[in-house]
């Protein structure tokens, strides 16, 4: 990052420095400060390529880096995976995977942890997706498209892909599912509602299956 910040806008380098300190405290004993800083700046750079939320980008980068570092620590076994981990992947992480993540989180009620990502993330979540989810009481206002990274795939027990082909790497011991769903981008609200309801039904069934498997002592 070069150049001075715009008048009235804090220098992102300062904000990222503060974020790096908070992450170092959170992951003390798990990762070196250099690893944390690298993940944070990689996350910032990745989001900067596509996101339209420039002012809050350091905040989103901190959240994204924390998610990635948690996933990495879970895969390495230094942070316990207390509940099953589910990863939802579509192309833009702006529609199908965001709806599925929110609905699985709702139906799981804390008994399942969910992440989502996109093979080619969009700048923002589709307005039609935000609207139809709000209709059923799900607020996507704090969510944002994130690029698919290796660490979140490695940490997952179940990976659900939606129209992203072979973009998601395959690792032994994970369950991979593909949901054949239309992309809601550019569709009418009525069409997006139908996609939402289809995802809702699939999400309910998946949560029930995951919890039954987990209760029986199944593990990857």
Image (spheres, grey):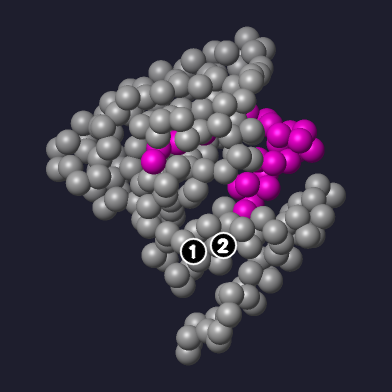
Q: CA distance from mark 1 to mark 2?
A: 6 Å
Residue name at image x 68 percent, y 47 percent: 69
- At which x and y percent is residue 52? 39, 65
Q: Is residue 71 above or below residue 41?
A: above
Specify the farthest residue to the right. 29
- At which x and y percent is residue 205? 41, 18
* Pointer 2 local density, CA inside 10 Å: few below 14, some 14–19, many at least 20: many
Q: Which residue is mark 2?
A: 44
Specify the farthest residue to the front. 166
Residue 218 lies in quadrant: top right
Residue 122 can be seen, yes or no: yes
Residue name at image x 58 percent, y 57 percent: 43
Would you say 181 lies left or right of 56 here? left
* Pointer 1 local density, CA inside 10 Å: few below 14, some 14–19, many at least 20: some
Say what secondary structure mark 1 lies in: helix
Q: Is residue 68 magenta?
A: yes
- At which x and y percent is residue 40? 64, 59
Residue 149 lies in quadrant: top right
Residue 84 lies in quadrant: top right
Residue 86 can be seen, yes or no: no
Over which residues does the magenta segment extend?
65-91
Would you say 194 lies left or right of 6 here? left
Specify the farthest residue to the top. 216
Q: Which residue is mark 1?
A: 48
**For the residues bearing labels 1 and 2, Cβ distance under 8 angstroms:** yes
């Amino acid at each position: 990052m070069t150049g001075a910040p715009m008048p009235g806008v804090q220098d992102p380098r300062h904000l990222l420095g503060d974020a790096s300190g908070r992450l170092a405290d959170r992951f003390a004993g798990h990762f070196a400060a250099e690893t944390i800083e690298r993940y944070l700046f990689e996350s910032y750079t990745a989001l900067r390529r596509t996101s339209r939320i420039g002012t809050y980008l350091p905040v989103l980068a901190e959240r994204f880096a924390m998610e990635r570092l948690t996933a990495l620590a879970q895969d390495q076994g230094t942070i316990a995976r207390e509940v099953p981990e589910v990863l939802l992947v579509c192309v833009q992480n702006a529609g199908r995977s965001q709806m599925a993540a929110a609905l699985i989180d709702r139906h799981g009620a804390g008994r399942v942890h969910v992440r989502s990502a996109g093979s080619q993330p969009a700048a923002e979540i589709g307005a039609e997706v935000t609207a139809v989810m709000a209709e059923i009481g799900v607020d996507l206002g704090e969510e944002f498209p994130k690029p698919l990274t290796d660490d979140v795939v490695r940490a997952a027990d179940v990976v659900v892909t939606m129209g992203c082909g072979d973009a998601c790497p395959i690792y032994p011991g994970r369950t991979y599912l593909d949901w054949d769903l239309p992309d809601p981008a550019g569709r009418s609200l009525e069409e997006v509602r139908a996609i939402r309801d289809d995802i809702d039904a699939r999400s309910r069934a998946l949560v029930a299956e995951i919890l039954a498997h987990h209760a029986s002592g199944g593990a990857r």
